[in-house]
């Protein structure tokens, strides 16, 4: 667990974590200090595709004023989405119609998931909470060791929750009772975020603030394999930050992850054996498609690496310093959103910008969600819009 002073210090710099990221990136790329604040101006481009708005809605105060990234979740024709001020909605994915909405009055910070008749959220006050997927009524609430900044995940029997202090818990799906606890050692300074678990074949696969990937037995919490993704380097605490804040991505038998100031890594999902690794830096995540893995880098570049060998296919620099969201693929395009609320569609083939739409001016921190043939975008102020490619 972080020393108390370190926790408080981390919280004080929470709103400046992106600034810290950029400062470090600038020092390694010879960018002047007075330039890294300047996001790239959007340039004219040859529009090849347009987005069609399927439906829209709103969810409370959205991401709120704290640095959280509350991603929507899709399961079996429904979408669940939460706001920082405690609103939870379940929506029909095709129409956007509300199936139910509840006002929990909880400071939700850890995103949302739905599985086996229950909806799970995590809070700033360290509670993991289960709601009924039928009507949103509260089923159980379990107090954990610290605030929860990642979405809980369930395999139908065990709910795995990753707390900000590095502790990972396995809770009974039906009661919330603690089954096991696994403690990782956090560095003195960490980014404001945590990796959501990936539940796979009896394992809970999780990235840590220390730059490691862990595979824990979901039933017992026993460590099955561990793999270092990034090695802390440099003299200052900021230079040595190698957090894995985004959830791992599964594509077939391959597992993809990326750390801040570290590497993008492809490994065998069953064993954790690394197949290849390349230097990269991201705190928001990645996506796969067309034989590539797409990384939204900390400095705003979007990089495409070949899945087979990690060779760089293309790199888009036109969106530098625009605080990109995690990417998502839709059709032949990869989409990212930025701090100003623009959604950019980039060709997966050559990395050229092909389309652009604006959801609102509040920006987009939450990861984009692809479901079926649609793209769900959730703005910082709580606007929720489903898009598809206009034929």
Image (spheres, rainbow, N blue to C red):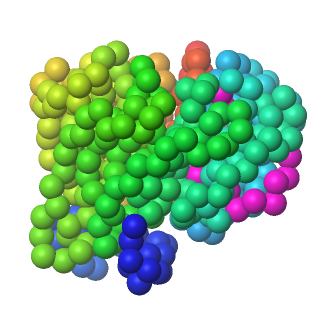
| Picture layout, residue 63 above or below residue 93 | below
Of residues 358 and 11, the one nearer the viewer is 11
Residue 229 lies left or right of residue 250; in this view the side is left
Asked whether residue 47 is drawn in magenta, I would say no
Is most of the magenta stretch helix, strand or loop?
A: strand
Q: Residue at x 14, y 41 (%)?
A: 278
Q: Is residue 242 visible?
A: yes
Q: Residue reaching furthest bottom?
A: 5
Rendering quarter of residue 386: top right
Q: Is residue 30 left or right of residue 251?
A: left
Magenta segment: 102-115
Corner quadrant of residue 165: bottom left
Q: Quick one: 223 or 89, which is closer to the camera?
A: 223
Q: Quadrant of the C terminus?
A: top right
The quarter of the picture where the N terminus appears is bottom left
Q: Name the spot of residue 56 as percent of width and height, x first.
A: 75, 37
């Amino acid at each position: 667990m972080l020393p108390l002073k370190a926790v408080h210090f981390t919280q004080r710099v929470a709103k400046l974590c992106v600034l810290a990221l950029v400062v470090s990136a600038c020092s390694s790329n010879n960018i002047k200090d007075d330039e890294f604040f300047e996001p790239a101006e959007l340039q004219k481009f040859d529009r090849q595709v347009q987005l069609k708005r399927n439906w829209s809605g709103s969810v409370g105060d959205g991401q709120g004023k704290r640095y959280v990234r509350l991603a929507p979740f899709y399961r079996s024709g429904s979408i669940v989405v939460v706001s920082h001020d405690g609103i939870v909605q379940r929506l029909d994915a095709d129409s956007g119609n509300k199936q139910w909405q509840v006002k929990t009055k909880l400071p939700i910070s850890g995103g949302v998931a739905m599985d086996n008749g229950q909806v799970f959220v995590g809070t700033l006050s360290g509670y993991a909470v289960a709601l009924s997927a039928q009507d949103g009524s509260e089923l159980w609430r379990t107090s954990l060791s610290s605030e929860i900044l990642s979405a809980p995940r369930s395999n139908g029997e065990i709910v795995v929750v990753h707390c900000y202090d590095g502790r990972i818990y396995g809770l009974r799906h039906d009661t919330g009772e603690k089954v096991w606890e696994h403690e990782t050692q956090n560095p003195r300074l960490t980014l404001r975020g945590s990796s959501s678990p990936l539940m796979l074949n009896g394992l809970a696969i999780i990235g840590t603030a220390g730059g490691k990937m862990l595979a824990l037995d979901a039933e017992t919490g026993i460590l099955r394999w561990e793999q270092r993704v990034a090695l802390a380097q440099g003299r200052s605490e900021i230079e040595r930050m190698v957090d894995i804040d985004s959830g791992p991505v599964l594509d077939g038998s391959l597992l993809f992850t990326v750390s801040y100031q570290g590497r993008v890594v492809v490994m065998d999902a069953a064993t954790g054996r690394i197949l290849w690794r390349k230097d990269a830096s991201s705190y928001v995540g990645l996506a796969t498609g067309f034989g590539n893995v797409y990384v939204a880098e900390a400095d705003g570049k979007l990089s495409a690496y070949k899945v087979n060998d990690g060779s760089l296919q293309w790199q888009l620099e036109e969106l530098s310093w625009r605080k990109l969201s995690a990417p998502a693929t839709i059709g032949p395009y990869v989409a990212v959103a930025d701090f100003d609320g623009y959604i950019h569609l980039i060709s997966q083939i050559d990395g050229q910008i092909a389309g652009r739409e604006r959801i609102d001016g509040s920006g987009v921190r939450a990861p984009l969600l692809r479901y079926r043939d649609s793209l769900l975008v959730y703005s910082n102020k709580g606007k929720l819009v489903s898009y598809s490619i206009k034929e």
